[in-house]
Image (cartoon, rainbow, N blue to C red):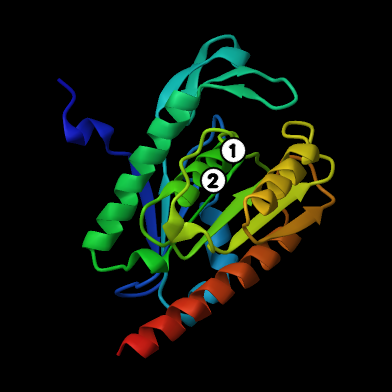
Amino acid sequence: MTTPDALALDTLQLDTGPDPRMTVIWLHGLGASGHDFEPVVPEFAFARVRPVRFIFPHAPEIPVTINGGMVMPAWYDILAMDIDRKVDVTQLKASADRVARLIETEIQRGVASENIIVGGFSQGGAVAYELALSYPRPLGGLFALSTYFATADSIDRSDANRTIPVFIGHGSYDPVVAESLGEAALQRLQGLGYTAEYHRYAMEHSLCMEEVRDLDRFLGRCGETIAAGSSSAT
């Protein structure tokens, strides 16, 4: 029998100050770990304005078909690298459910769901799309970096997050996840009634300082909304 603890993800947590009331959950890409974006945290000015908790989950290790069945950290199996990506949707949704447990834990720790922002890079971004747009409570924001909307045709969208702020960033020279997939995600979101900001960078499948600065501003705006909401509630 699978116990609830067996579903828990290992994570790296970084708090930029005492008693954070804002949490950012950031999912890494294929073959990486939660440490991948740890060095970015000191670059964020918004996290120096108020205490922020960063949670970087580590994906479980599973066989990945496109890499010859090699076992590596992955949020789901990729079955084929066709134009739209053929992925194991069941595994993707299961990963989204496991990350949702992290959100529930943060809520239990006293962070309101509206103060929790979810995002990810590549595979992690695909999981973030699924999680944020289907989560039953309102979240503070969604960011999707060098990724694609893998479950656009199957997602069970939540009314609670129909107006969630969305940041999309993609490299114009990305040889791993073509920019056309990032643009397609934007079009699908717009077609579904979401408002998203799209940023293009002269880079490959990576993160650049210009993107970090833009993401900093986006997260800062989300933080200002959170702070305003907290003030009106008191």
Q: For marks 1 and 2, give the one nearer the viewer.
A: 1
Viewer-proximal residue among 233 and 222: 233
Q: Amino acid at mark 2?
A: Tyr
Q: Hey, which quadrant is residue 114 in on the image?
A: bottom left
Q: Residues within 10 Å of mark 2 (few under 14, many from 20)?
A: many
Could you tell me which secondary element the residue under label 1 belongs to? loop
| Percent coordinates x, y for residue 89 in the rendering | 50, 26
Can residue 28 be seen in this snapshot? no
- Quick check: 69 left or right of 13? right
Image label count: 2
Q: The N terminus lies in which quarter of the figure?
A: top left
Q: Quadrant of residue 80?
A: top right
Please state which amino acid type lies under the numbered disc 1. Ala
Label 2: which secondary element: helix
Q: Is residue 34 left or right of residue 13?
A: right
Query: Which residue is denoted by mark 1 in the rendering?
Result: 152
Measuring from the top left, give residue 111's x and y in whole percent.
31, 67
Residue visible at 40% across and 29% down? 60
In this rendering, is residue 60 above or below 18? above
Quarter of the figure that contains the C terminus:
bottom left
**Residue nearest the viewer, comparing 12 with 119:** 119
Q: Is residue 32 left or right of residue 22?
A: right
**Gap between marks 1 and 2, in whole Å?**
9 Å
Q: Position of residue 7 (x, y in %)?
A: 27, 33
Question: Is the Cβ of the residue at disc 1 closer than 8 Å to that at disc 2?
Answer: yes
Tell me if residue 54 can be seen: yes
Q: Residue at x 44, y 47 (%)?
A: 134
Residue located 69% across and 20% down the image: 81
Mark 1 and mark 2 lie on one chain; the one further toward the N terminus is 2
Left or right: residue 138 compared with residue 130: left
To which quarter of the image does residue 83 belong? top right
Say which residue label 2 marks: 129
